Amino acid sequence: MDDGYGWIIDSPRDDPKGLIDDQNEAEGADQLAALAGRASGATGACIQFAEGEDLRRYGSWGAPEDVTAPSRAVLDTGKPVVTTTYLGHPVHDRMGRVLGVCCAYKADEADKADKKNATGWTATQRQAVAEAAEVATLLIGEQLARYELEQQHRFLDAVLDSLHDGVAACDGDGRVVFVNERMRRLWGDAPVDEARGLSDVSGMPLARDDLGLFRALRGERVRDVPVTVDQGRHHRALLMDAQPIHGPDGRVVGAVQAVQDVTRQRRAERFRSCELAVTTALAEAATIEAAGPRVLEAVVTTLNWVHAELWTVSGETIDAVARWSAPGWPADIPVPDRLEYGQGLAGRSWQVDKPLWIRDVARPQSLISPDTSADRLHTALAIPVHDGSGPIGVLTVFADSIEDPEDELVALMSGIAAHLGQFVERRRVEDLKRQLTRSKDEYLALIGHELRTPLTSISAYTELLREADEVSLVRDGPRLIEVIDRNTNSLREIINELLELSALDAGHADVRRTPMDLALVVREVVERARTAIAGAPVEIDTELPAELIVPGDRERLRHVVRNLLGSAIRFSPDGGHVSVTLRDTGRFAELTVADAASDVPRAEREHLFTGHFRTARAQDRILPGSGLGLTLSRAVVHRHDGTVELTGDESGTTVQVKLPME
């Protein structure tokens, strides 16, 4: 049934149980039945209610009788039914529908004693039952109205509680009369009619009169007013609407306020702003060190952190290359310049290679020193930065409040770390392209020279053989053939190295990493080198363990050791010493080859590994070799996920190779 306000409410005819079971209403129905029975001179009376296909007594008086059949006739016809022992009138609702029956009845003995009226009922008795039916109609109608109103309230409460928006209402005096569940959650612990913890977009606290309810009570219509609820470091962003409720005479009799939570939308906007600022900072910087401060500034200012740091991996340590604190925060937060592997928050994140969320660094823990937190920093998050080869750094951020982990925030920070990793990889590729372009001609000239030298010798000695007479051929032939053979082998070695380097660079070389004893390989190479340079004014010193097992390609690593040792021997001055050291550092096998030659200038060190460059010190001596040894060695080491580093000082030059133990 439509009540005229858009609500479809079932009538008691379909669901009357709640009405019939009301004890107070049942007692009223009993009294009405008693009045009808006495006024009609009946031995009994009742008021019945239709319950589906059945009739149920709502109120009764006098002796009970089964009057179902005649009462059913009243329901079916909607008209009074009169017999000598039964008098029934229909009971209607306000829509005119028959809901039940009000009836009086006589026992057979009473009917036989009354012979004054052929129907058994006088006009006065009939009128009494008809009037009782009208009263029953009023009684049922009033109860039905209350029932419908209660149903409407329940429906309305259920609908409002299911909304995603918070809703509150007040009366004309400003007393809050309704608050749905969503409003309670959005508003927090404060009452809805208080402005505790609320502020506008500029951060100014709101007064009670600034709330939408009370602005609407003053006749104002409020639309999409932004409000912030302070909840620790996080602030819930709301949009507030409100409007007055007018009575029939046009006066304001109350107000209603609706609040929409737009925190997720605002957070998404901040995330987009952060990503844009980070992208802009990276686009305008040449190196990760130069981009670091601007990246950290974007992260701190857009995501409400108070301090951030950027660390980059450097060998066995991780170095702090940038830091940033929010305006108003002290700039002297102590940050170590360098951390060991697994040390501190950045070192641990590097070690485990996954994000780390510390809820409160001010509590006793092993990653952040008390001097750094100093009861000012609390929640901390560390995110590893990767390039194509693995972790190359860590991004750490700190908050001034205690916060539980947030998956969305961790995902965003991981995305920013990915941007940093891609930036480093992209810059590395660009640097390599520039180096290749710059040194291509030098490379071609060097390789052309190295190829031309043995070819010239082969050509010249072949010509001598062709022009030699019989005596000269017998006397000088073997020596000339030996020179040709030596240069042929040299040419073959250069070509093989070029092919190997090309395959390694392209990733086509088959590098088989199986457990091998690196100490044994180094010992064998050293012994052969000592035999080859026997009598030369150069000595080889070694410091090798009995055994050191690493996963590697035995023959390729043997070639690396031979290249490094051969280069050191060639550069060493007369009377010099070449030292070869191999040790286990825990995570890496560390091979060091040092000579006593003059130091390679710092500007030339990286060029030595390109295959396109020969150091200035090489111009002082005639050196055999293609100049590709260090280049090929680094390519092999990189395919083993290792590193090659060249250092030096006045005492000599050192090449250090690190190979992972696992």
Image: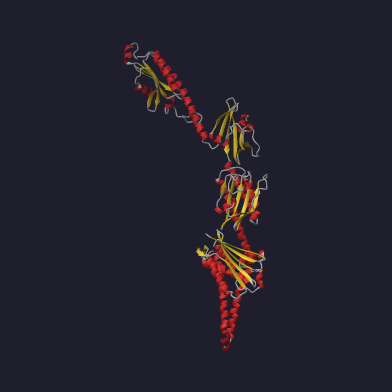
> How many callouts does the rendering have?
0
Task: Specify the color scheme.
Answer: secondary structure
Q: Is residue 416 visible?
A: no
Asked if residue 52 is positioned above or below residue 365 in the image, the reply reads: above
In depth, the one of 116 and 166 nearer the eye is 166
Q: Quadrant of residue 27?
A: top left
In depth, the one of 113 and 619 nearer the eye is 619
Residue 539 coordinates in the image, percent (x, y):
61, 71
Residue 360 coordinates in the image, percent (x, y):
59, 44
| Residue drawn at (56%, 75%) of the image | 489
In depth, the one of 306 and 319 nearer the eye is 319
Q: Quadrant of residue 533?
A: bottom right
Asked if residue 365 is positioned above or below residue 160 in the image, the reply reads: below
Residue 62 coordinates in the image, percent (x, y):
37, 16
Q: Is residue 263 visible?
A: yes
| Residue drawn at (60%, 50%) of the image | 396
Residue 222 coordinates in the image, percent (x, y):
61, 34
